Image (spheres, rainbow, N blue to C red):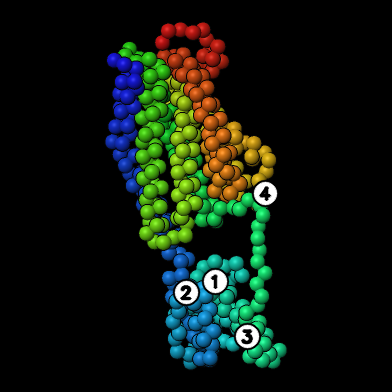
Amino acid sequence: MARSSKIHLVATREIRQRIKSRAFRIGTAITVGLLLAVSVFSAFNDNGTKTIRMELSTPALSTVISQTAKAEGVTFSILGFSSLKNAAGQLNAGTIDLLVTPTKLFTKNPVSPTDSSTLGRFTNALSSRLSQLATYSALHLTKEQVAGLEKPITVSIEAVGKQPRARSSVEMSLLGDILMFVLISQYGSWVLIGVIEEKASRVIEILLIHLKPLQLLVGKVIGIGVVAVLQAFLLLGSAVLVLSLTGSPYVHGGSLSYLLLLTAWFIAGYSIYCVAYAAAGSLVSRMDDAQSVSIAVQLPIIIGYLLSVTSTRGPEISPIIRVLAFVPGFSSLLMPALYASGSSDMAEQLLAMVICLAATVLLARIGAHIYSKAILSIGGRVKIRQVLFAKAETA
């Protein structure tokens, strides 16, 4: 049987085994459900569809309210006003959201100047507008003077530096960071556990009668990788579909290009880490030792994830972060975040990708050597120094 056919058989076996497992199906269903719920909440939480219920102490305020509501893109309804005391009671009961008087606005809960909710944006905008009108009145300005102030001369602002991408790409990159970390860790663990289980049950001895260690390693990594990509597309596709249907600003051309780039980096990151996980799994024969050998592989993922969510979205990116973004193992987590924030262009992405792929090929050769030498060692944990410097043998 040709080498490619044997690898195909191993990959197919892994795909069927993973997809048919109840844990995979239930886990995927739950994750997709959570993503859909979060996407729907994000789309409707602050999209201007909330109707603000209010009372006015004087009908003259309705014009200002209508203008402000139109500018902010919100809808409102005005209830009948009886007295300040009754209106305050309705605020506390939640019957109305806002009580408007010419000199003060009343809400049930505090509204900060940076509140981004529909009620918060509208209340701050209305407060600013009423303050402006009160100032005009206090200065006894004529209608002509007020009209002149309402149409000020505009001074344009032009940026000469590199333009950052839309903020929605940055927000979506947070979801990308989480998915990248979770999926690489999850599927890397699958590879690790799968190798240990086969080794502990002695199934590996039967498999290696017909397969070379390298063929088994490549088939396992490819098979689980196909399942990983399918699940990643399912998760991201579900979120993007809901956000698109609800007209969310988080999905646009920049975000879609980021998702394509994220997919490419996921494949690159999965490739380099899963070879390392397979090599680590071949060093032990008991599931109790899985955690100890996986720490060295998991550590760069954890560090890369923490750096991606804390150090890639500020106005200035540290030179250390920029250097680490080209280091294989960190690049799959840092580069997508830098691209989303506008701190890295496509040329840098391609260069980092080439470096990562070259490192993957080198690590694959080293990992295959470790895997080949350690996979049949049953019993205690094999020291990596033993297999790295072991003399070549026929697999």
- Disc 2 target residue: 74
Query: Do callouts 1 and 2 mark residues in contact (Cβ within 8 Å)?
Result: yes
Q: Quadrant of residue 142?
A: bottom right
Residue 105: x percent and y percent? 57, 81
In the image, which disc is placed on residue 121? Answer: 1
Q: Vertically, is 25 above or below 128?
A: above
> Mark 4 falls on what kind of element?
loop
**Label 4 Cα crowd, 10 Å radius (few <14 / some 14-19 / many 20+):** few
Query: Do callouts 1 and 4 mark residues in contact (Cβ within 8 Å)?
Result: no
- Disc 3 target residue: 147
> Mark 3 falls on what kind of element?
helix
Label 3 or label 1, whichever lies nearer to me, is 3
- Earlier along the polypeptide chain: callout 3 or callout 1? 1
Residue 379 visible within the image: no
**Is 83 placed left or right of 127 in the picture?**
left
Residue 230 visible within the image: yes
Calculate the distance from the C-alpha at mark 3 to the C-alpha at mark 1. Answer: 25 Å
Amino acid tagged 1? Arg
Q: How many numbered marks have been drawn onto this rendered protein structure?
A: 4
**Label 3 Cα crowd, 10 Å radius (few <14 / some 14-19 / many 20+):** few
- Earlier along the polypeptide chain: callout 4 or callout 2? 2
Amino acid tagged 2? Val
Write the residue at 48% across / 90% down: 81
